[in-house]
C-alpha cells in the first residue's frame, strides 16, 4: 500500500495553469498571449487566474507542443505541484 497521496491526471487538473508563468528566451508565444509583470514577459491570465492558453472545457493546454519552457520543466508530483494541489 502506497503512502503517497493520489495525484489526479494532468489532463484533468489544470491547477498549475493558474500560476504565473514567466517566459524565457527561446519561448515562441504569440504576442497576444503575453502580459508584462514588472517588465517581465509572462503568459497572460484570465480573470480567474487561469493561463490564457488553458482550454476551460478540457483543462488542456492549447499551446502544448510549443508551451513555454517553464511549463515543460514543471514536475508532476514535485514540490510545487503538491503545493498547488495542497497535498
Image (cartoon, rainbow, N blue to C red):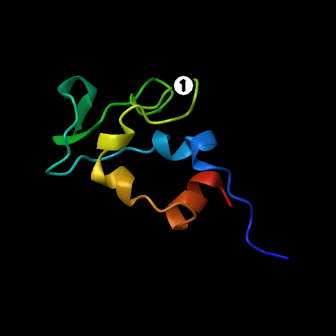
The reply, left or right, for residue 6 in relation to residue 42 is right
The reply, left or right, for residue 87 in relation to residue 71 is right
Note whether residue 38 is visible: no
Which residue corresponds to the image point at 49% horizontal and 27% vertical from the top-left?
55
With respect to residue 84, does 5 lie above or below?
Answer: below
With respect to residue 35, does 16 lie above or below?
Answer: below
In depth, the one of 70 and 45 nearer the eye is 70
Q: Quadrant of the C terminus?
A: bottom right
With respect to residue 79, does 60 lie above or below?
Answer: above
Q: Position of residue 46 (x, y in %)?
A: 43, 25
Which residue corresponds to the image point at 58% horizontal and 42% vertical from the top-left?
11
Residue most toward the front?
A: 65
Quarter holding residue 14: top right
Q: Position of residue 62 (x, y in %)?
A: 41, 31
In depth, the one of 35 and 56 nearer the eye is 56
Q: Quadrant of the N terminus?
A: bottom right
Which residue corresponds to the image point at 24% horizontal and 46% vertical from the top-left?
23
The reply, left or right, for residue 87 in relation to residue 50 is right
Count the marks: 1
Residue most toward the right?
A: 1
Q: Position of residue 63 (x, y in %)?
A: 35, 35
Name the residue tied to disc 1. 56
Amino acid at each position: 500500500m502506497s503512502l503517497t497521496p493520489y495525484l489526479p491526471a494532468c489532463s484533468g487538473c489544470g491547477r498549475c495553469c493558474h500560476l504565473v508563468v514567466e517566459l524565457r528566451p527561446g519561448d515562441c508565444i504569440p504576442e497576444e498571449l503575453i502580459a508584462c509583470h514588472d517588465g517581465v514577459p509572462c503568459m497572460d491570465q484570465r480573470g480567474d487566474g487561469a493561463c490564457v492558453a488553458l482550454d476551460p472545457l478540457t483543462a488542456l493546454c492549447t499551446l502544448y507542443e510549443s508551451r513555454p519552457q517553464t511549463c515543460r520543466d514543471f514536475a508532476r508530483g514535485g514540490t510545487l505541484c503538491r503545493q498547488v494541489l495542497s497535498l
